[in-house]
Amino acid sequence: QVQLVESGGGLVQAGGSLRLSCAASGGTFSSYAMGWFRQAPGKEREFVAAINRSGGSTYYADSVKGRFTISRGNAKNTVYLQMNSLKPEDTAAYYCAGKYVSGSYYYASTYSSWGQGTQVTVSS
C-alpha cells in the first residue's frame, strides 16, 4: 500500500487560493489513480476530484468544477489540488486517497490508501 501525506492547507479569505499537495511513498505511485475527498464537521466525507493513473483523465464534483484543478507528477510521486475562488463552504478537512483497483472514482470505498488530512478554512 502506498503511504500518503498531505500538505498545503491553511486559512484563506473567500475568493483566495490554496494548493494542496499529497506526497506518496512505499508503493508504485503510477499504479494508483488518485483522489481528493473532504469532510466538514458533522457531514459525511464527500468526493472532490480524481485523476487516473496517467493523468490524462480528471473528474470533479459539480460544486468545485471550474474552480479546482487536480494534477499529478508521477516523477515526483505527488498529486496536487489547486483551489481557486474559494468559498466558506469549501471549509473542511481535505484527504488524499489512492485507488489501486478498478471501480468508481467517486466513491470513497474504492480507495485503499488514505492520508491523514489537511485542514482548509475559508473565512467570509
Image: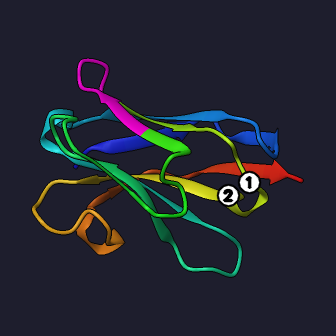
Residue 60 horizontal/vertical position (percent): 39, 56
Q: Are marks 2 and 1 in contact (CB under 8 Å)?
A: yes
Q: Residue furthest right?
A: 124
Residue at point 15%, 54% (across, down): 100
**What is the total number of numbered labels drawn onto the structure image?**
2
Residue at point 77%, 51% (across, down): 121
Where 100 falls versus 12 (above or below)?
A: below
Is 74 in the magenta?
Answer: yes
> Which amino acid is tagged 2?
Asp
Residue at point 56%, 45% (across, down): 67
Which element is circle 2 on?
helix
Judged left or right of residue 36, residue 116 is right
> Which amino acid is tagged 1?
Lys
Where 45 falls versus 9 (above or below)?
A: below
Quadrant assignment, res 93:
bottom right
Range of magenta residues:
70-77
Judged left or right of residue 122, residue 34 is left
Q: Nearer the viewer, mark 2 or mark 1?
A: 1
Judged left or right of residue 81, residue 109 is left
Q: Residue furthest top?
A: 75
Judging depth in this view, the residue of 44 and 68 nearest the camera is: 68
Is 19 in the magenta?
Answer: no
Q: CA distance from mark 2 to mark 1?
A: 5 Å
Which class describes the residues within 10 Å of circle 2: few (<14), some (14-19), or many (20+)?
Answer: many
Residue 2 horizontal/vertical position (percent): 26, 44
Residue 123 horizontal/vertical position (percent): 87, 51
Residue at point 47%, 64% (across, down): 62
Residue where numbered disc 2 is placed: 90
Quadrant assignment, res 13:
top right
Residue where numbered disc 1 is placed: 87
